Amino acid sequence: MLPSTLRSLATVSVLAVIFVPTLTHSADADRPLFPKDGPTIPKGLVPIFWPKDNPYSPEKAELGWLLFFDKRLSADNTISCASCHDPKFGFTDGEKISKGIRGQFGGRSAPTVINRAFSLDQFWDGRAKSLEEQAIGPIANPIEMGHTHDACSSGIDAIPGYKKRFTAAFGPGPISIDHIAKAIATFERTVLSGNSPYDKFEAGDKTALSEGPQRGMKVFFSNNARCDSCHEGINFTNGKYTNVGIGMDKPKPDLGRFEVTKKEEDKGAFKTPTLREIAKTGPYMHDGSLKTLEEVVEHYNKGGIKNPWLHQDVRELKLTDQDKKDLVEFLKALSGEGWQHIQAPKEFPK
């Protein structure tokens, strides 16, 4: 996760039958979906860090795009990555709790893929240490895609169109789950959001935010609300895990990060999500229990849900009705651009 010192930067389809793909599939026919030199970085963000063992290439990114939307990665050909991370819902599914094969429900809401390039640990509880690890986790989850990694990779390997694309991206040889992970992760790192009204305002365009969002920005960064104590940096998250009380009043609450670390202080703690595109990625919280941004603001205004592990910064704020309204307007001003051109492929490799 990017350090807090970067907060200053926040303020300022049978496509597969050909060996080397044509990389223009966006709404603008003259704009490559995956440019040779990588995606354009929207204002307000920083350059993407590409792992040494998984550097960017347009062939790999497009391959990951196809795999991301392909339901053949699931055991019964009914679920793709995009089933829970759909562009129509800001790369979430718009549901309280996500659903996998055979209509099975998990226990958590699907977080957005947007700006995952700027995060290290993945999932609400941080159990995956990289996007590559995260990308293939759901494939073998019996509630999500219900496959095995071996069966998935051998199934994809048997599709001639994919075989050619994997050869173009990784060289000759059998398709492995590692290749699938690297391709999907490469695509996911191109899903970006920046150049929001907030970014434009901070870059000097004082007309980019009206008076309401400007007041809301003051509330957000105030010594009272201190929203930026967790939602900081270019991606409006510190990447840490915090107990804000959600679900802790249930008989058997989801203990979140504790299930990974087994540390007492991590009980009920979940990863602080990005606030970019937050207006499009509801319902909110790890359990999808808050339907609107107004409900989210009111949750914090009341001081969360009391429990022994509640974070010390979660306390009653005593915001006025106007403060709360303005804060919501500011959160909406964090919606930007850089991902809207990404849509599902019209055809898949055969």
Image (cartoon, helix red, strand yellow):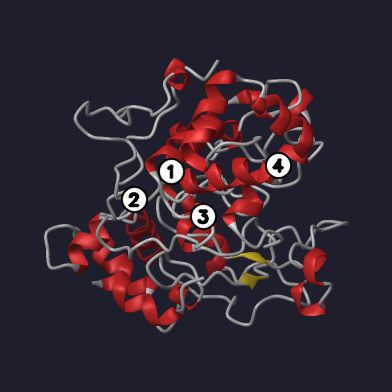
Q: Are marks 4 and 2 in contact (CB under 8 Å)?
A: no
Q: Which of marks 3 and 1 is nearer the N terminus?
A: 3
Q: Distance between the residues labelled 2 and 3?
A: 29 Å
Q: Distance between the residues labelled 1 and 4?
A: 23 Å
Q: Which of marks 2 and 1 is nearer the N terminus?
A: 1
| Mark 4 or mark 3, whichever is nearer to me | 3
Front-most of residues 124 and 169: 169
Q: Distance between the residues labelled 4 and 3?
A: 20 Å
Q: How many labels does the image show?
A: 4
Q: Decide if residue 62 is on the left or right side of residue 251.
A: left
Q: Which amino acid does label 4 sit on?
A: Pro
Q: Decide if residue 286 is on the left or right side of residue 165.
A: right
Q: Name the residue under label 2.
A: 335
Look at 60% across and 35% down and name the residue there.
Answer: 81
Q: What residue type is labelled 3?
A: Asn
Q: Which of marks 4 and 2 is nearer the N terminus?
A: 4
Whether 183 is drawn above or below 120: the answer is above
Q: Name the residue under label 3.
A: 54
Measuring from the top left, give residue 98's x and y in whole percent: 67, 38
Q: Which mark is residue 138?
A: 4
| Mark 1 or mark 4, whichever is nearer to me | 4
Look at 46% across and 41% down and name the residue there.
Answer: 60
Does the image show residue 147?
no
Q: Residues within 10 Å of mark 2 (few under 14, many from 20)?
A: many
For mark 2, give the secondary structure. Answer: loop
Q: Residue 208 carries which label?
A: none
Q: Which of marks 1 and 4 is nearer the N terminus?
A: 4
Q: Residue 280 carries which label?
A: 1
